[in-house]
Image: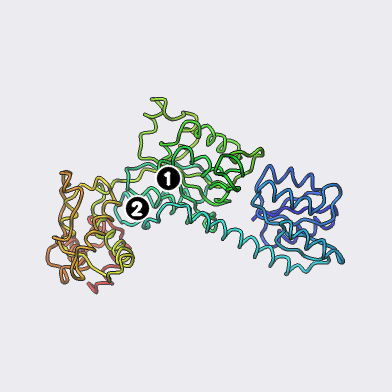
Amino acid sequence: MKILIVDDEKNIRDSLGRLLELEGMKNETAESGEKARELIGSRRFDLALVDLRLPGISGQDLVEWIRDEGFLLPVIMISAHGEIQDAVRAMQAGARDFVEKPFDSNTLIAKIRAITGEEKNRNITEAASRKLPEMPRLVGEHPLIRDLREKISRLAAGDSTILITGESGSGKEVVAREIHETSPRSGEPFVAVNVGAIPENLLESELFGHEKGAFTSADSRRVGLFELAGSGTLFLDEIGEMPPALQVKLLRVLQDRMIRRLGGARDIPVNARILSATNRDLEARVAEGLFREDLFYRINVIRLSIPALRDRKEDIPLLAESLLPRLCGRLNCGQKKISAEALRKLGSYGFPGNVRELENILERAVIYSPDSVIREEDIEGRGEQAGTPAVQQSPPPENGENGTLRGAERELIEKALKEHEGNRTRAAKALGISRRTIIYKIKEYRME
């Protein structure tokens, strides 16, 4: 959290600065309204503490300027005794609260935390109304997924721009969300936008916002996704579909960390981490002149590649186990399990649509299944209809505990343990899961 202190008295600026530092809050100071404008226009703050009486531009004038310019910057006014009416007028002009000198430190800190929390929640709510449909978490124990998790844990702590590549439906947004949620930015908004799903004439406004009157239907100011992301994460899905004109503007944002609303005359600092994703061959699009080479190098600082589902089909039982409760809850049909026969049939698909296709197949199966167990005949897959070649693998056992996923899983583990003479490490490696997971499963199924 970063606070701007605006006061013409040095002792006030210094004492407030020390107080904020003790509370773990960064701060910068300005001795005048003019200096405050300069700082607000060049970097991002979470809140401003503004003295009502300032030389030149008054505190109220500064609040009105912040409001008129459209900065997402809440203000707490600092007023002396006898200036309460002036402070109230400043609040009517846009300030969020005020404290009276001499102020109580605990009260001031409480106000700062409350207001910044409200502002963050407001941005999260607004961003949530525009984000992509939420996808499942990153599920799987295949070595490719374990390696991906390790990379995510290393990359999450930094601020590097990351390009996530993979086939459609493989879970690129899932990975982006995992990066955000395991990063120091996890308490800030995660904002996702599918660049290819928004018409070109609306995309600029969606990303950068617009001012009232910027175009015919712009009857009010609209804040863009870059601003709503705050100090969080902005995820640009299918970035390979971005129009050339917007590629230039995105390049400027990555270089200067500034945006300008459509129809606006002022640059606005932004601080979000940028993650992007594509299922296209961006190098080929660069060679074809469809994607800017300089932008490609800016977004491709670090690349993460997501494996296709056909390359980790051992994870299908775990994915099904993860997806079914959410699907059953959404469809309001009671909880269902999946039989070993149904899992075997799923294992024969090529899954050109990856995890998204698996979810669609399971959703249809939940609807078609007449009882609490999804059977082989309930599975209808686009991959099968399209003649997708099946990938050969060892099918789950047919006779598990009541033919369920748990039974199939238990029998697979028992078989691996027998083949490796009870050696848990080798059995886990053969199954493509961690030793910790197989030990947990042995205890869960009381197989000791």
**Percent coordinates x, y for residue 259 in the rendering:** 60, 40
**Among numbered discs 1 and 2, the one appearing first in the sequence:** 2
Between 194 and 147, the one lying in front of the other is 194
Residue nearest the viewer, comparing 161 with 82: 82
The quadrant of the rendering that contains the C terminus is bottom left
Amino acid carrying mark 1 in the image = Asn
Query: Mark 1 to mark 2: distance in Å?
Result: 27 Å
Residue at 23% x, 57% y: name it. Answer: 431
The residue that disc 2 covers is: 146
Q: How is the image coloured?
A: rainbow
Q: Which residue is mark 1?
A: 194
- Answer whether residue 141 is visible to the viewer in this image: yes
Q: Quadrant of residue 403?
A: bottom left
Q: What is the x, y in percent for residue 38?
A: 74, 42
Instruction: Give left or right: position of 395 versus 34.
Output: left
Looking at the rendered structure, the secondary structure element under dot 2 is: helix
Looking at the image, which residue is at 70% across and 65% down?
109
Image position of 64 (left or right of 344): right
Which of 22 and 251 lies nearest the eye of the viewer?
251
Where is 164 relative to 319, above or below?
Answer: above
Label 2 packing within 10 angstroms: few (<14), some (14-19), many (20+): some
| Residue 259 visible (yes or no) | no
- Against 408, residue 188 (above or below) is above
The answer to whether 427 appears left or right of 224 in the picture is left
396, above or below 288, in the image: below
Q: Nearer the viewer, mark 1 or mark 2?
A: 1
Quadrant for residue 217, please give it: top right
Q: Residue at x 36, y 36 (%)?
A: 280
Q: Amino acid at mark 2?
A: Arg
- Please tell me how many numbered marks the rendered image carries: 2
